[in-house]
């Protein structure tokens, strides 16, 4: 019941915070539009690369498409990460400790809504981009596997960054993780599994396996990825709770 109360009381506050902050509002509006950007911008770029450099970008469309759920999770997680920083600065989190709404209720609300929104937008983005033929199951499972990353991003920023300036720097630094994830696409041996230490790898691998027609392997990798991300989330939740109570 207290978690339901958290949805009722904090939901309106979050909407207000996003609406009043231009940066957060821009990210929230731009996220679903990113799929359309892929649909209309990537094919002309592919044509130009083929004409000028004889480079076939179309062959790498599955790689590009696989990053869409990650982009959604990263953008939405960043928005919530900055909300956490704002609430830390405003002492909102400290005030929760003396109300019937516990920090645990707050986190359950915050992370569940965050991941549900990520799943929704992530599932929508894949057919909006439309660069490859995808099934609804592929879009949904890839988005579900990527959703915990949104919570990981948010808790990472809310825990590590001292303010929004540091938050921006950390958000940019996290982008470096994408480089080895791209490299993993070109590793065809069993060494590719070594990239599984990065939580970003699992939703990408799930998408690639679906694209190759290996549905069973894709579902198995989704379960492994969700389990590994759950471990990371548990660590971050404990760390965030410690920071919020200081």
Image: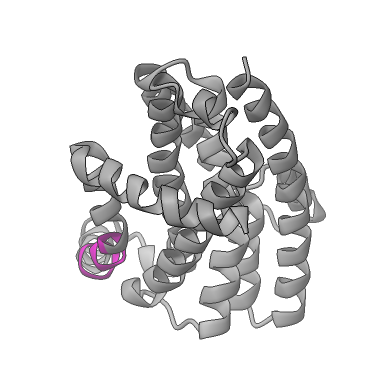
Whether residue 232 sits left or right of residue 1 in the image: it is right
Coordinates of residue 222 in the picture (x, y in percent): 71, 65
Front residue of 91/182: it is 91
Between residue 206 and residue 60, name the one nearer to us.
Answer: 206
> In this rendering, is residue 26 above or below 36?
above
Residue at image x 30%, y 50%? Answer: 15
Quadrant of the frame with the N terminus: bottom right
Image-quadrant location for residue 23: top left
137 horizontally vs 118: left or right:
right
Number of numbered discs visible in the structure rendering: 0
Q: Magenta-highlighted stretch: main secondary structure?
A: helix
Question: What percent of the width, then of the height, locates residue 135?
Answer: 51, 85
The image quadrant of residue 82 is top left
Q: Position of residue 242 (x, y in %)?
A: 68, 22
Q: Residue furthest right?
A: 190
Q: How is the image coloured?
A: one colour
Residue drawn where x is 36% and y is 22% of the image: 164
Q: Does residue 93 lie above or below 33 as drawn?
A: above
- Examine the rendering and report whether any part of residue 223 can be seen: yes
Q: Quadrant of the C terminus?
A: top right
Q: Is residue 56 visible?
A: no
Magenta residue check for 234? no
Q: What residue sits 63% from the left and 28% below the top?
A: 240
Question: Which x, y percent locates residue 204?
Answer: 59, 59
The segment highlighted magenta reads: 33-41
39 inside magenta stretch: yes
Q: Is residue 22 above or below residue 41?
A: above
Q: Closer to the camera, 239 or 14?
A: 14
């Amino acid at each position: 019941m207290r978690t339901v109360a958290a949805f009722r009381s904090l939901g309106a506050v979050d909407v207000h915070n996003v609406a009043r902050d231009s940066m957060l509002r821009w990210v929230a509006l731009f996220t679903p539009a990113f799929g359309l950007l892929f649909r209309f911008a990537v094919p002309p770029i592919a044509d130009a690369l083929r004409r000028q450099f004889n480079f076939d970008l179309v062959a790498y469309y599955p790689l590009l498409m696989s990053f869409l759920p990650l982009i959604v999770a990263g953008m939405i997680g960043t928005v919530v990460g900055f909300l956490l920083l704002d609430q830390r600065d405003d002492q909102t989190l400290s005030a929760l400790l003396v109300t019937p709404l516990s920090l645990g209720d707050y986190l359950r609300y915050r992370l569940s809504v965050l991941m549900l929104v990520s799943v929704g937008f992530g599932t929508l983005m894949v057919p909006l981009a439309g660069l490859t033929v995808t099934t609804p199951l592929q879009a949904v499972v890839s988005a579900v596997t990527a959703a915990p990353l949104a919570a990981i991003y948010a808790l990472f920023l809310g825990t590590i960054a001292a303010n929004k300036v540091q938050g921006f720097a950390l958000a940019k630094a996290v982008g470096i993780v994408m480089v080895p994830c791209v490299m993993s696409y070109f590793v065809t041996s069993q060494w590719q599994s070594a990239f599984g230490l990065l939580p970003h790898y699992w939703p990408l691998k799930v998408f690639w396996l679906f694209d190759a027609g290996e549905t069973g392997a894709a579902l198995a990798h989704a379960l492994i990825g969700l389990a590994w991300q759950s471990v990371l989330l548990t660590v971050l939740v404990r760390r965030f709770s410690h920071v919020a109570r200081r």
